[in-house]
Each structure stands twice: as C-alpha cells, then as structure tokens.
Image (cartoon, grey):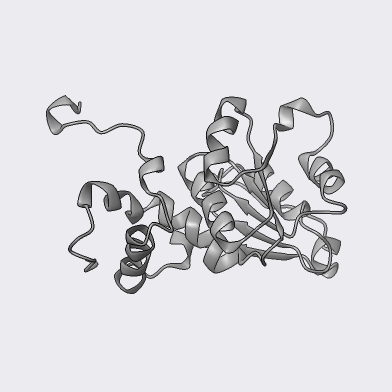
C-alpha cells in the first residue's frame, strides 16, 4: 500500500502502479541519459512509451523508437520519440543501423520487449566507452543472452531493472507528484475508460 496525494484522481494515477513507472524509472533511474544524449527504445508498447517519456524528461535530444509495428510510430512522437527504425525495413542487424545513425552507437538503450534478440541488439547498439543498455522486458524462461565478451571489454554497460528501480511505498508518491505538477502526462497513456458493467 502506498499513501499518495489525496487530491490525485485515482482513475488516472492507478496506471502508475506497473507499466508506466517501470518504463519511466528504467530511463530516469537506471539508464540516466545525460542532457543532449541519444537514446534508443526497443518496443513501443506502454512500457516503451514510458521509457521514451523518461528519456524526454531527462533531456535526451534524440530518442529513437525501434518497433516491428510502424503503426505505433506516430503516437510515439507524443512521448518524445524523434526518429524510428523498423528492423524489417533493413537487411542488416538493427545495431548496425543505429550505429550508422548515431556515429558509432547510442548513448543509452532501453529494451522493453522481452524478446531475447532485441535484448542482445539493445546491448550491442550502445557506444563503446560509455554506452549503457537497460533490460526491462521479461524473456522466455529458456532464453540465453549471448554476446561477445569484447562488448564488455570495450566498456559497454549492461543493466537490468524491475519496476524501474522504484520502491513502491516510498517512491510512488513522488511519481504521483510528477503527474500533479504536470511534468508527467498520464492521460496520454489512457486510451479507453470502460465502466465495470462493460468489462467481460
């Protein structure tokens, strides 16, 4: 149980209890993109859009959305994405596409798909020397992460996170305050409001 601002509308801030906080925190708390940096977000569902939003709030200058479904691209602009890559449009690995777009690799990447290949590409697309990749998606239980050890020796960093490194009881009230101060727009994550009578 988290005690939040009593003025907060529960029908809006309820969505902060999982996906939005996870993506937002993955960017702000774990990837920590410096102002003006370049961030790739793999997967533009709710968690990925929240990761893009977090990168925008942190001050990233380029936020590249990576998704197999191009119908998500236009909406993702509202969450801070500036460019898009559909891996299906290229006949080479997406890490190479991103490296060409960014002069050697992105500064940060946040993986929000749970697909093991996307996770590997998200790690291998960050820049040597300072790049940080954050894994958010939950992979299949038999999945194995395989990459060349040189990717670590070249000073790339791989991190994982659960719930965006937020501690629910102490940190969620602060996320609600971001919404109350209009720094985080929760409404744009809500597509439908359905009364209980119409559910199932």
**Residue 62: percent from the left, percent from the top?**
70, 50
Q: Quadrant of residue 107?
A: bottom right
Q: Is residue 199 left or right of residue 88?
A: left
- Using the image, determine if residue 12 lies above or below residue 194: below
The residue lying furthest to the bottom in this view is 170
Horizontal and vertical percent position of residue 7: 19, 61
Residue at image position (19%, 28%) is 199
Q: Quadrant of the N terminus?
A: bottom left
Task: Where is residue 95? Give x, y as percent.
Answer: 79, 45
Frontmost residue, 134 versus 192 = 192
Q: Position of residue 75 (x, y in %)?
A: 52, 33
Depth order, front residue of 151/51: 51
Query: What residue is shown at x 50% (from left), y 39% (from top)?
Result: 45
Location of residue 152 with respect to 9 vertically, above or below: below
Q: Residue at x 62, y 27 (%)?
A: 70
Q: How many marks?
A: 0
Q: Is residue 63 above or below residue 133?
A: above
Residue found 79% across the figure and 66% down from its top: 152
Residue 118 visible in the displayed image: yes
Q: Residue 118 falls in which quadrant of the image?
A: top right
Q: Is residue 124 left or right of residue 34?
A: right
Residue 162 seen in this snapshot: no
Q: Is residue 10 left or right of residue 86?
A: left
Q: In the picture, which quadrant includes the C terminus? A: top left
Q: From this viewpoint, which residue is outermost toward the front?
A: 181
- In the image, residue 37 sits, relative to residue 40, either above or below, namely below
């Amino acid at each position: 149980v988290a005690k939040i601002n009593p003025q907060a509308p529960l029908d809006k801030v309820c969505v902060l209890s999982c996906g939005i906080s996870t993506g937002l925190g993955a960017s702000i708390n774990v990837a920590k993109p410096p102002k003006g940096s370049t961030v790739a977000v793999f997967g533009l569902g709710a968690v990925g859009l929240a990761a893009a939003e977090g990168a925008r709030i942190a001050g990233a200058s380029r936020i590249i959305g990576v998704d197999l479904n191009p119908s998500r691209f236009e909406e993702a602009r509202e969450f801070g994405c500036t460019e898009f890559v559909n891996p299906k449009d290229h006949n080479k690995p997406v890490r190479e596409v991103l490296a060409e777009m960014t002069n050697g690799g992105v500064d940060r990447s946040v993986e929000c798909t749970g697909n093991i290949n996307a996770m590997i590409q998200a790690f291998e697309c960050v820049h040597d020397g300072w790049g940080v990749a954050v894994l958010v998606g939950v992979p299949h239980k038999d999945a194995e992460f395989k990459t060349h050890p040189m990717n670590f020796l070249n000073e790339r960093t791989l991190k994982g996170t659960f719930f965006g490194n937020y501690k629910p009881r102490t940190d969620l009230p602060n996320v609600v305050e971001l919404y109350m101060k209009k720094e985080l727009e929760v409404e744009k994550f809500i597509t439908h409001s359905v009364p209980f009578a119409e559910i199932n």
